[in-house]
Image: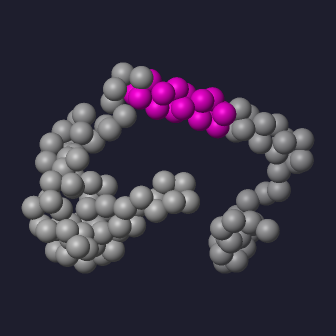
Amino acid sequence: MTLFQQPRWLRRWIRRRTNPIPMDRAHMWKGRLSLFYAIVAWHAFGGVCYMIYTGRNDWAKFYGYKSEEEAQLPQAIRFAKQLNLPNAKVVKLSGITKTDEYELKDLEVIRPGVDAAASAANVEK
């Protein structure tokens, strides 16, 4: 079973236009490609570690793709903007315990039972 099913017509098209490869040659190329993939993956991992070590883990902010205003927004509001959800209910969890719960109305935080000034001050924390 494969993760992504190859279309049947594509398989027939490829098999008609190519010759079978001997097993030993296919095994040799599989090993070479595996080694190449391992080296590329290791270098990519090293690049990510280097970026984190040098303080550039938020690369969008570092290279200027994200403004300071966007960087200060809570993650829930950023996701709501990206998903085009002006009204949403946000539940924050830490492990399996609920730490916070509020609603977004037109991308503004509304906490039940709290006035608007206290709610806005709590978001900026």
Q: Which residue is drawn at 14% across and 68% down?
A: 115
Classify residue 63 by image quadrant.
top left
Q: Is residue 5 above or below residue 43?
A: below
Quarter of the image for the N terminus: give it. bottom right
Q: Residue 105 vs residue 12: left or right?
A: left
Q: How many labels were placed on the picture?
A: 0
| Magenta stretch bounds | 36-52
- Is residue 100 in sight in this rendering? yes
Q: Residue at x 10, y 61 (%)?
A: 117
Whole-percent x and y of residue 122? 21, 54
Classify residue 92 by image quadrant.
bottom left
**Viewer-closest of 9 and 111:** 111
Whole-percent x and y of residue 87? 25, 77
Whole-percent x and y of residue 45? 54, 32
**Viewer-closest of 123 and 64:** 123
Tell me the chief SS of the magenta region.
Answer: helix
Q: Which residue is drawn at 42% across and 58% down?
A: 99
Q: In this view, does 10 lie above or below 40?
A: below
